[in-house]
Amino acid sequence: MLSRDPNKSASLTVEQRIAISKLGLFPVHIICDDPSRTDDDRDCVAFFAACGCVPRVDERLKLEDGKSFKVTSVHHVVTTDQGDSNMPSIVFLTPNVRTVLCVPSDASHSE
């Protein structure tokens, strides 16, 4: 569910999606980027979060490590999971939330 490769996204299994759904939540793909880093030294993390709502543009997300990120865009992506022999194919609409690291003066507004 976590990826640090800026060229790949995190992934979920059908079982993980079902478990999230049983909690009354849905998966949101979160992409946290530090634009101050060079392309060769890119610090990017992507993960799925079980959410009750989709973060909106300009909202802030505070990660467990204390870093704050500002939501810059939200795109919805359609994906198909082929499942296995016991499950039919399932089409998912997944929100993809792109965020950028807040600079210290910007992060003070996150509380």
Image (tube, grey):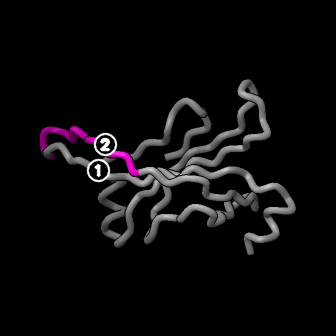
- The percent coordinates of residue 77 (x first, y second) are 37, 46
Magenta span of residues: 76-87
* Residue 80 position by quadrant: top left
Q: Quadrant of the C terminus?
A: bottom right
Q: In this view, does 57 lie above or below 3?
A: below
Q: Identify which amino acid the numbered label 2 is placed on.
A: Thr
Q: Residue furthest bottom?
A: 111
Q: Identify which amino acid the numbered label 1 is placed on.
A: Phe
* Residues packed near mark 1 inside 10 Å, few (<14), some (14 to 19) or many (20 plus): some
Which residue corresponds to the image point at 73% horizontal and 43% vertical from the top-left? 34
- The percent coordinates of residue 100 (x first, y second) are 68, 50
Asked whether, in this view, residue 20 is left or right of residue 31, the answer is left
Which residue corresponds to the image point at 76% horizontal and 56% vertical from the top-left? 102
* Residue 110 position by quadrant: bottom right
CB atoms of marks 1 and 2 within 8 Å? yes
Please tell me which residue lies in front, 76 or 22: 76
Mark 1 element type: strand
Q: In this view, does 81 lie above or below 72?
A: above
Residue named by callout 2: 79
Residue named by callout 1: 92
Find residue 5 and name its label.
none
